[in-house]
Image (cartoon, rainbow, N blue to C red):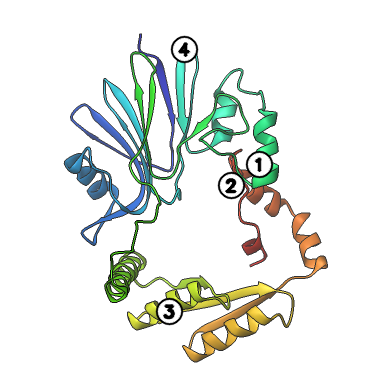
Amino acid sequence: MDKKVLFLLEKYHLAKKGETLIYFKGHFFIDNILYEKDEAVFQLLKMYPKIPKHGNFSYVMVNHNYIKIVSDKTGSSIVYYCINEDRMIISDSVNEILQIGNGLNELSFSNLKELKVAGFVSGGETLVKGVISSQPGEEITINHKTSEVICKDYFQYFSLTQKNRKEQVQIEEHSRLMKNAIYRLKKYCKKRTLVLPLSGGLDSRLVLRELKREGINNIICFTYGKKGNTESEKSRKIAEELNCKWIFIEYNRTKWKETFNTKEFQNYLFSLSNYHVLPHIQDILL
């Protein structure tokens, strides 16, 4: 027997083609072509069952036979669901599910211990028993009639053996991938200002250099920490060398105490945690 399905996806773009409904949020690239809103939805239907490799998105595809839930490979957009005896609830907010889902009030203390130690709950579970989250690079299929749930990874992060590849070949491949990534970022951001957390390390320095090489100049760099720390001094010199605006956010006990006690911080912490991961709190001082 088909269960009643409640979709709580107000921030998603809704489109219909034939008997198929799609709730979509975000953007993606196919062959470096940007797809958003209706164009993204129609492209998804056209390329089904393939899933985009690049972008920040999640979507829910619905027809008479199944519901498919997909999150991008970085987990930038997560969907949550619960299934009980008479209905399913699908949302991008655990709080919204809890407000409507009768009986969904039992915490998993084993998952709470994991959250305290690791900063997240693994395997798609949350702190609330019965509420499940989609995983990065995962496709979830829910059968309408049987409520059977099948989870399949469409993408996994792993290193290929590089023993037989020459160093120069790997360098060229890295350059090609980096160039494509920066191109997609430029195309998506258009003329918007980019804000880059710039440390003294190699990763963020590489990103900044490639952005400048691509001709992107509307960049603001920032770093944080105790006043006079080595990392922030390296960051400042790199930003100056590449002619970028640089901002330093000083850490001290007084500022952190004031921040922790604000209503804005509490809202930030609990609204973004969604009962399965601790949000990044350092940038809140910005």
- Amino acid type at circle 2 is Leu
Disc 1 residue crowd, few under 14, some 14–19, many 20+, Cα 10 Å: some
For the point 65% across and 57% down, which residue is it? 281
> Percent from the top left, x then y, of residue 72?
38, 47
Indicate the amino acid at tag 1.
Answer: Leu
Residue appearing at x 44%, y 38% in the figure: 10
Question: Would you say the residues marked 2 and 4 are in contact, meaning their CB atoms lie under 8 Å apart?
Answer: no
Disc 1 to disc 3, C-alpha distance: 38 Å
Name the residue beneath numbered marker 4: 86
Residue 205, given in percent of the width and then of the height, sits at 48, 78
Rendered-image quadrant of the N terminus = top left
CA distance for labels 2 and 4: 29 Å
Of all residues shown, which one is farthest toward the front? 164
Q: Marks 3 and 2, Cα distance to the nearest angstrom?
A: 28 Å
Whole-Å distance between the Cαs marked 3 and 4? Answer: 52 Å
Label placed on residue 152: none
Q: Which residue is mark 1?
A: 115
- Mark 2 secondary-structure assignment: helix
